[in-house]
Amino acid sequence: MTDDTSGQPIFKGLVGVFADESAVSKVMVETNSLTYRGYPVQDLCEQCSFEEVAWLLWEGELPTRKQLNAFRRAEAAERGISRALVRVIEAFPKKSHPMDMIRTAVSFLAQEDAEAGDISEAATRRKALRLFAKIPTAIAAACRLRDGLRPIRPKPELGFSENIFHMFFGSVPEKRVVKAFDVSMILYAEHGFNASTFAARVVASTQADLHSAVVAGIGALKGPLHGGANEAVMQMLKSVGTPARARGWIDDKLEHRALVMGFGHRVYKHGDSRVPTMSRYRDSVAEATGGQKWVEISTILAEEMMAKKGIHPNLDFPAGPAYFMMGFPVDFFTPLFVASRVTGWAAHVIEQGADNRLIRPLSHYTGRPQREVVPIRARG
């Protein structure tokens, strides 16, 4: 924090600033737990499905069995994407980043949505369900089309996470792998006023539509300091290669003060509360797929970072290798993050709309003082 010439404090990065109120989620400092609507996320992971958590974020309470069944049917019925959108995705340059693909796909979905411009709460909730259902279909289609394969239609009889595997690979893995993926979706779903959620709320505060807010969130999430970190973590682990190289690799990075991805978090001071849960499920995926070397490398890096820098890993650190062992291409990790976080973004857009005020902070000017314009003939 610094002061401007008038003595007003300047909080770079908005560190420590409360921009608004929210009832969606909170990190409980006293228990070091991330909570959604008051429920510890680690408990939600063990006892609930991702669909239940999506309902919780939007409705404020966990669903009854009847409500959950109706919600699942409604989501499954909305999964299909148009042939026109498939053609748009097919026309993307092959070197396009998947986050650019899904950003454009969401913009196109807005053009097809008859309620796109309706910012009423009821319409926003309906659009949220459609985006929740269609975004995974668009992501899977983008992946397959880029690889020269035809998209696989969603199966309404499959659960949300099972269906993602089906649309990517044409098959569903064993239950513990699906459960690990479902847990990752829950853990990534929401996290307060993070960069992408704040971006979405800023856009929503202008009374723009949900699709515009989600596009803004995708843009913020693409950055490696936010959502793109899970991709960077896996690239890092691949560059280490083997457990035998891990200690020397991390020592070299620390000696040269290089950035090590997947460590540290602005909110957590005693370690990311989501990491133990995701790490257990990463280990379960490793057992199922024979990927133990990634767990061994990760363990060594985490131990060395803690011993020499006192820095804990964040959620991206175990999630990256978990997705890799599941078979997802590395550059599609962050789009999978989108498939989860759209639930949190929608919850915040709904909340913003309920008591809206345009988000418009000030900046301290450090440029030239006011001066006269010199005519071009006098400038030489």
Image (cartoon, grey):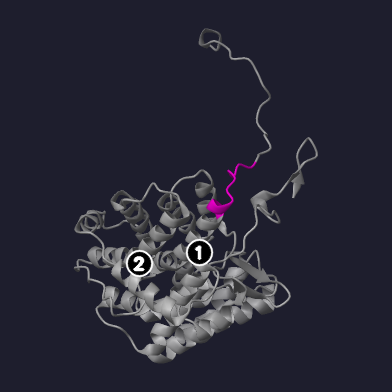
- How crowded is the residue under tag 1: few (<14 C-alpha within 10 Å), some, or many (20+)? many
Task: From the viewer's perspective, tell me whether residue 265 is left or right of residue 243.
Answer: right
Q: Which residue is at the far top? A: 377
**Count of numbered circles on the image:** 2
Q: Is residue 8 above or below residue 39?
A: above
The amino acid type of the residue labelled 2 equals Ala
Highlighted range, magenta: 352-361
Whether the magenta-drawn stretch holds residue 161 is answered as: no
What is the magenta segment's predominant secondary structure? loop
Query: Residue 267 appears at what percent x and percent y?
Result: 65, 66
The residue most toward the front is: 66
Q: Residue furthest right?
A: 7
The image position of residue 290, as x and y in percent, is 39, 90
Alpha carbon distance from label 1 to label 2: 14 Å
For the point 79% across and 35% down, the residue is: 6
Q: Is residue 36 visible?
A: yes
Can you say whether 108 is above or below 346 in the image?
above
Q: Which mark is residue 133?
A: 2
Secondary structure beneath dot 2 equals helix
Give the residue pinned by disc 1.
344
Disc 2 crowd rating (10 Å Cα; few below 14, some 14-19, many 20+) is many
Viewer-side residue, 375 vs 101: 101
The amino acid type, in three-letter code, at marker 1 is: Gly
Whichever of labels 1 and 2 marks the residue nearer the N terminus, that label is 2
| x and y percentages locating residue 319 in the rendered image | 48, 76
- Cβ–Cβ under 8 Å for marks 1 and 2: no
Classify residue 335 as left or right of residue 230. left
Residue name at image x 56 percent, y 8 percent = 378
